[in-house]
Image: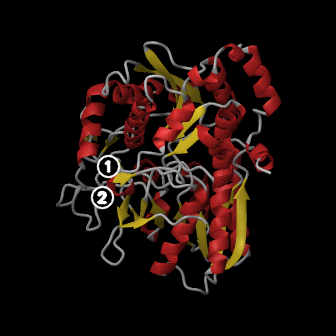
Amino acid sequence: MLRTPYRFVVLVCAAALCTALFAGAGAASVPRAQQGITKDSVDVVVLVADLDGLRAQGLSLPAKLTTGNLTKRWQGYFDSYGKINGRSIKVTPVTWDPVDPKSFEPTCIKATQDNKPFAVLNANGYRASSVGCITVDNNTFMFYGEAVYAALQKASGKKLVSLGVPAEEAAKTGVAIANKQKFFPKTAKIGILSGNEPAIKAAGDTAESELKKSGYTIAQKTEINIVGQDTAAQLRDAQAAVATMKAAGVDTVVVVVPFTVNSSFFDEANNSNAGFKYMLIDAASSLCTQFGASRVPAAIGPANVPCVTTWDTRAVNAKNAVKKDNPFEAKCRKIMDAALKEKTEPGVPAGDVTDANGQTLTEDLAPNECTMADLFVQALKKAGKNPTTDKLYDAFLTLKSNPAAYMSNGQGGFSPSKTYFVNQVHLEILNQASTQTAKDANGLYNGCPAPVNCWVPQLIGGSEWFAVQPAT
């Protein structure tokens, strides 16, 4: 039963193809338990976006956004720990093309067949539907930095652990907080903008079910073909969804698709005076992060858009300060500053930002990479001098309380029944700022640490953070 939904997820990397390639690579001669382990090194592949390729295609990107700098983050964090049980961690980058949906499966093959690593790591951006090509079809251990979904985790078994809140839990927790805060009246006619990428679909389906249980009317649910279309087609479908929802009488939209897709929906809704209210369910890549906020169209900035998420922000509820680093975050900042030879600034999205006065603010630290490197090192130590991926997986599940950067109220943990790290979420509201926003009296930009949109955490009953609700 598990293989049927999983096969929906894997489009190009079918089992026969992956098995043939795997056999052709001569992998049978290498014991799987020892793959990627030498006397002196532990070989890991890190999946990073091909930013250099995007620039070569003519896309305008800040100079600092390069494939090499994404890789330096990982290597810098791992190098800071020195040797683990006598071995260094060797990082090999493998890229995918963010604007080509067909690039994910070849990336899987490069990661698992061409390199044969001990483990594959991805901080953000790699499509969840292609994770199974790594963990199931190629039997390779993966530590994934975002949201997985129940069927994938079950199919992957001991080859997958993750950082973020799984899709089903994210949706259930989000709807519960929306109910508690009374985001929408019971008379609301809700539209759900979802997609066929399995993690996104799982979140959309769970949100629909939980909203119905709470007595809301779902007037329209639209699923964007994210898996089978290029970005331009996805944007066209998202734009067209506005008219469909207006025709259905929708007044409130729950958005599950990522900012790479939802921007055209927001723009069209604004241009057509749809008057929608919004809520974001955080199961898509970088949706409710600092970087995600900076990519949300200014048109919805004043709309009090809420998101329930584990990802933290450097803004504070009173919008009068920048949140201070906890001790682990301060360590992460020091390491990244040294690795990239810069002085990171809290709350600034990747690639730097220049404000209206010509002041350039330097990009913030990379929290997922730092947290994941720390957890991987701790688990690798526990796996011993002769590590196997089964030992590594078991060691991860013993890490019950570890520090975290920019997520989960600064701490998280695994358990034998919990294969994802974060424990807590909070409610954030989108706050508008732009490069034309002047500094305020607190040295901020309309309460944001940088001159871009930001998420501002909200207090519920005097508290900011709340436990993730299990999906079952």
Whether 13 is drawn above or below 184: the answer is: above
Residue at 35 percent across and 48 percent down: it is: 404
Residue at 72 percent across and 53 percent down: it is: 196
Q: Nearer the viewer, residue 383 or 231?
A: 383
Which residue in the protein does label 2 denote?
Answer: 315
Q: Residue 408: which quarter of the image? A: bottom left
Which sits earlier in the primary sequence, circle 1 or circle 2? 2
- Residue 362 locus on image (x, y percent): 29, 38
**Amino acid tagged 2:** Ala
Q: Nearer the viewer, residue 272 or 215?
A: 215
Is mark 1 in CB contact (under 8 Å) with mark 2? yes
| Circle 1: element type | loop
- Residue 166 locus on image (x, y percent): 56, 55
Whether 76 is drawn above or below 145: the answer is: above
Check disc 2: other Cα within 10 Å, few if <14, some if 14-19, many if 20+: many
Q: Nearer the viewer, residue 268 or 122?
A: 122
User: What residue occupies the far left of the structure in this picture?
Assistant: 441
**Amino acid tagged 1:** Gly
The CA span between labels 1 and 2 is: 7 Å
Check disc 1: other Cα within 10 Å, few if <14, some if 14-19, many if 20+: many
- Residue 258 locus on image (x, y percent): 57, 52
Where does the C terminus fall, quadrant-wise?
bottom right
Q: Does residue 59 appear anywhere in the picture?
A: no
- Residue 185 locus on image (x, y percent): 55, 85
| Circle 2: element type | loop
Residue at 52 percent across and 34 percent down: it is: 391
Q: Residue 350: which quarter of the image? A: top left
Q: Does residue 87 appear anywhere in the picture?
A: yes
Number of labels in the image equals 2
Which residue in the protein does label 1 denote?
Answer: 347
